[in-house]
Amino acid sequence: MQWHSMSEFLAMGGYAFYVWGSFGVTFGCMLIEMLLLNSRRQRITQAVKQEAF
């Protein structure tokens, strides 16, 4: 596919809602996963520090 303008690219041949929605959901899931992993790491680090003393 070739796009001749930015608006054609953003429209994605009529599938813009599906394409950009998919990107948005994927990005959101990855962001939530990173936040949950960070939270879990902090809890584990605190637990290990408490057990060490």
Image: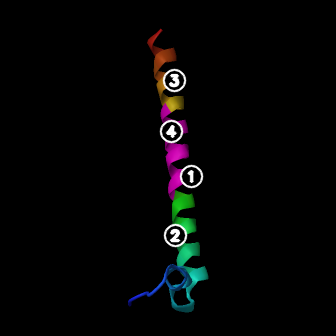
Q: Secondary structure at mark 2?
A: helix
Q: Amino acid at mark 3?
A: Ala
Q: Are marks 3 and 2 in contact (CB under 8 Å)?
A: no
Marks 3 and 1, how far apart at CA: 23 Å
Q: In x, y percent, where is residue 3?
A: 43, 87
Q: Give the mark nearest the N terminus, 3 or 1.
A: 1
Mark 1, secondary structure of its residue: helix
Neighbours of disc 2 within 10 Å: few (<14), some (14-19), many (20+)? few
* Residue 23: mark in rendering: 2
Main SS category, magenta section: helix
- Do the residues under discs 3 and 4 have CB atoms within 8 angstroms? no
Q: Badge 1: few (under 14), some or many (20 or more) residues near its Cα, within 10 Å?
A: few
> Closer to us: mark 3 or mark 2?
2
> Does residue 12 show up magenta in the picture?
no
Measure the C-alpha gap from mark 3 to mark 4. Answer: 14 Å
User: What's the amino acid at mark 4?
Assistant: Asn
Residue 29 is left or right of residue 2, and the answer is right
Q: Which mark is residue 47?
A: 3
Q: Earlier in the sequence, mark 1 or mark 4?
A: 1
Does residue 23 lie above or below 39 as drawn?
Answer: below
What is the image's colouring? rainbow
Q: Earlier in the sequence, mark 1 or mark 2?
A: 2
Compared to residue 26, the image places residue 15 above or below, namely below
What stretch of residues is rendered in magenta?
Answer: 30-41
For label 4, the residue is: 38
Q: CA distance from mark 1 to mark 4?
A: 10 Å
| For discs 1 and 2, the disc positioned in front in the rendered view | 2
